[in-house]
Image: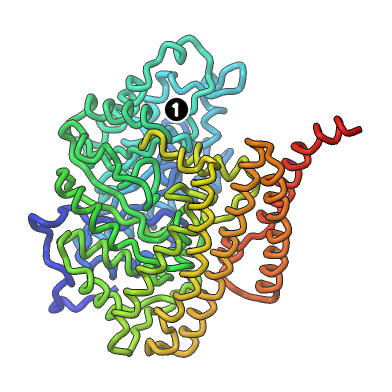
């Protein structure tokens, strides 16, 4: 990587209106591809970002054994592939850390704990109880985490610190998803458990001069409170890393209520620039306006850092660096230096940097394309803002998440799991789910919302003007293809919402008119699935395009609704017989 030392970075150093820590996050296998990391480091240098986060739940298990439990002789005897992989991975991560450090960028690892190599249960069989569950309250874990952190800082000396999520259900062992029924677990306080875990990690990290940051990734408000209280008890030097919205990156949700309420602990605030819950970057849109408002709030609440996520662990070969959503990374980086920055200047900076075609996967490393038309910044701005308005109306229902990782609901139960239970707003806004109840008033609003999304997506082409932007013809054609798929995508949500909420009204009320309406909503689902099959036949798009338009889920929804309606009709048929 080479840089012109005479060229100043794009932004001024953070001052009273900016953040001291300005991080960029990798959360997919892209972090293990040097070309993509080098590209990101170059971008970070240009836009004056100073922290790189590698977010992989088990990344420490790819860098340490630990040798106290997995000595060299045993590894050679039983697990030689893991032995050599760990040594290889150390060389790679140390290269990343060195290259980043040379640019004034600190490397952090973001993980979930408790995590371990499965073979540990063979080495320490007592960790598993008679019922097969792994006991989270066994004191062994605190010794294990201490040893693991000590080995990590020796293996990666330039590491700046570790960011940990102890409140999630996604780790291998946690108090929030505990199934162990031993007496010790029954008597355990969640706050005490979090404090033991964080203390076991913080002591060796602090001794080596490394930072421990604790994320609030929790599925409920009570778990969030337990974890944050434990961090405060553990050490005043711990950083609290908070998503800008509670639970996950939903732009329609309120601000995370913990921002500004961390009992004096330092705060970093996290933002999604790519689109985990708004189109996977394939259907590009702006969240710059949302970030500016939320960064103002974060800064006023005492936050000292921000982090910009650029991809997601579940989707490979995709991120903000192969999407027009690179705008959101540019905007986030520039706002992190000055939250009052003029947004038109951000759109102009994006146009100068260039945009990426969403039809090219990340590993293709296609260069950014700079539009030549002088009005390009304005057209791009108007499109990206309007596109968010489309996505908000299509993939959300009155601000509630209506999709499963950007895919259509595949059953009534799954639709309401997404809307109310797994990604519900009631924990953060009591009573919010009342907006989803199938009353006459609510249904009129919900159906109109989806109709409006379809009308608006059909106007996006006139805003973007792909053929007039001054881009290479192939890129313009790819943008036009994306717009066509976008319209189909939005139409699918309109049809799914009509079927889901009609069926819910029929299921709750038993009214003949709504049973009939729900039945009438099923054939359009099947026709839509047939149309999408025809649209995608013989195409060679990035694989996540087929994820977004997976109409097997639409067919499953149609079958489920028919089954629900059949059960409603069964009692009447029995009486008639």
Reply above or below: 134 against 552. Answer: above
Residue 180, given in percent of the width and then of the height, sits at 53, 19
Q: Is residue 301 visible?
A: yes
Return the residue at label 1. Answer: 176
Q: Find residue 431 and report its image quarter.
A: top left
Residue 449, given in percent of the width and then of the height, sits at 48, 58
Which quarter of the image is occupied by the C terminus? top right
Residue 557, given in percent of the width and then of the height, sits at 68, 50
The residue at the point 81 percent across, 35 percent down is 570
Tag count: 1
**161 vs 309, nearest the viewer:** 309
Reply above or below: 332 against 234. Answer: below
Residue 488 shown left or right of residue 86 in the figure:
right
The residue at the point 34 percent across, 84 percent down is 370
Residue 209 shown left or right of residue 279 in the figure:
left
The residue at the point 20 percent across, 62 percent down is 335
Reply above or below: 174 against 444. Answer: above
Helix, strand or loop for disc 1: loop
Q: Can residue 35 be seen in this view?
A: no
Reply above or below: 552 against 364. Answer: above
The residue at the point 37 percent across, 77 percent down is 355
**501 vs 220, nearest the viewer:** 501
**3 vs 43, nearest the viewer:** 43
């Amino acid at each position: 990587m080479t840089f012109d030392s005479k060229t100043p970075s794009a932004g001024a150093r953070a001052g009273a209106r900016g953040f001291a820590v300005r991080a960029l996050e990798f959360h997919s296998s892209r972090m293990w591809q040097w070309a993509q990391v080098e590209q990101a480091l170059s971008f970070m240098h240009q836009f004056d970002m100073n922290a790189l986060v590698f977010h992989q739940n088990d990344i420490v298990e790819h860098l340490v054994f630990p040798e106290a439990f997995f000595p060299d002789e045993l590894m050679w005897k039983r697990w030689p592939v893991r032995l050599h992989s760990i040594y290889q991975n150390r060389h790679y991560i140390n290269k990343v850390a060195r290259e980043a450090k040379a640019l004034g960028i600190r490397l952090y690892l973001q993980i979930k704990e408790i995590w371990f190599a499965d073979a540990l249960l063979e080495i320490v069989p007592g960790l598993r109880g008679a019922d097969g569950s792994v006991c989270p309250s066994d004191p062994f874990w605190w010794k294990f985490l201490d040893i693991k952190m000590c080995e990590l800082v020796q293996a990666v000396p330039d590491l700046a610190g570790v960011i940990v999520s102890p409140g999630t259900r996604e780790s291998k062992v946690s108090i929030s998803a505990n199934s162990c029924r031993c007496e010790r677990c029954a008597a355990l306080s969640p706050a005490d458990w979090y404090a033991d875990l964080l203390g076991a990690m913080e002591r060796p990290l602090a001794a080596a001069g490394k930072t421990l940051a604790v994320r609030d990734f929790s599925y409920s408000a009570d778990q969030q409170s337990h974890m944050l209280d434990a961090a405060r008890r553990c050490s005043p030097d711990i950083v609290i890393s908070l998503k800008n919205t509670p639970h996950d990156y939903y732009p329609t949700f309120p601000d995370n209520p913990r921002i500004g309420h961390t009992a004096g602990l330092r705060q970093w605030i996290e933002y999604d620039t790519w689109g985990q819950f708004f189109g996977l970057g394939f259907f590009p849109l702006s969240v710059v306006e949302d970030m500016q408002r939320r960064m103002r709030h974060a800064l006023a609440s005492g936050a000292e850092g921000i982090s910009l996520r650029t991809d997601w662990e579940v989707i490979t070969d995709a991120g903000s660096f192969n999407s027009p959503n690179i705008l959101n990374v540019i905007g986030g980086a520039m706002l992190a230096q000055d939250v009052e920055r003029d947004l038109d200047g951000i759109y102009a900076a994006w146009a100068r940097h260039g945009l990426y075609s969403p039809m090219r996967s990340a590993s293709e490393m296609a260069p950014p394309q700079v539009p030549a038309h002088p009005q390009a910044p304005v057209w791009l701005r108007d499109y990206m803002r309007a596109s968010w308005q489309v996505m908000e109306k299509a993939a959300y229902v009155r601000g509630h998440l209506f999709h499963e990782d950007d895919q259509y609901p595949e059953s009534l139960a799954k639709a309401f799991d997404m809307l109310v239970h797994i990604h519900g707003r009631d924990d953060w806004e009591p009573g919010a789910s009342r907006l989803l109840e199938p009353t006459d008033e609510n249904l009129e609003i919900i159906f109109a919302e989806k109709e409006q999304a379809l009308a608006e997506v059909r106007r996006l082409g006139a805003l973007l003007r792909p053929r007039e932007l001054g881009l290479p013809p192939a890129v313009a054609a790819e943008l036009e293809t994306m717009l066509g798929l976008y319209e189909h995508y939005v139409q699918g949500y309109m049809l799914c919402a009509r079927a889901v909420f009609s069926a819910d009204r029929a299921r709750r009320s038993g009214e003949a008119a709504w049973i009939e309406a729900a039945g009438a909503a099923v054939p359009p689902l099947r026709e839509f699935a047939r149309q999408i099959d025809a649209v995608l036949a013989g195409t060679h798009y990035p694989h996540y395009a087929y994820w977004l338009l997976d109409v097997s889920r639409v067919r499953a929804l149609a079958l489920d609704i028919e089954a629900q309606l059949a059960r409603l009709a069964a009692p009447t048929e029995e009486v008639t017989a």
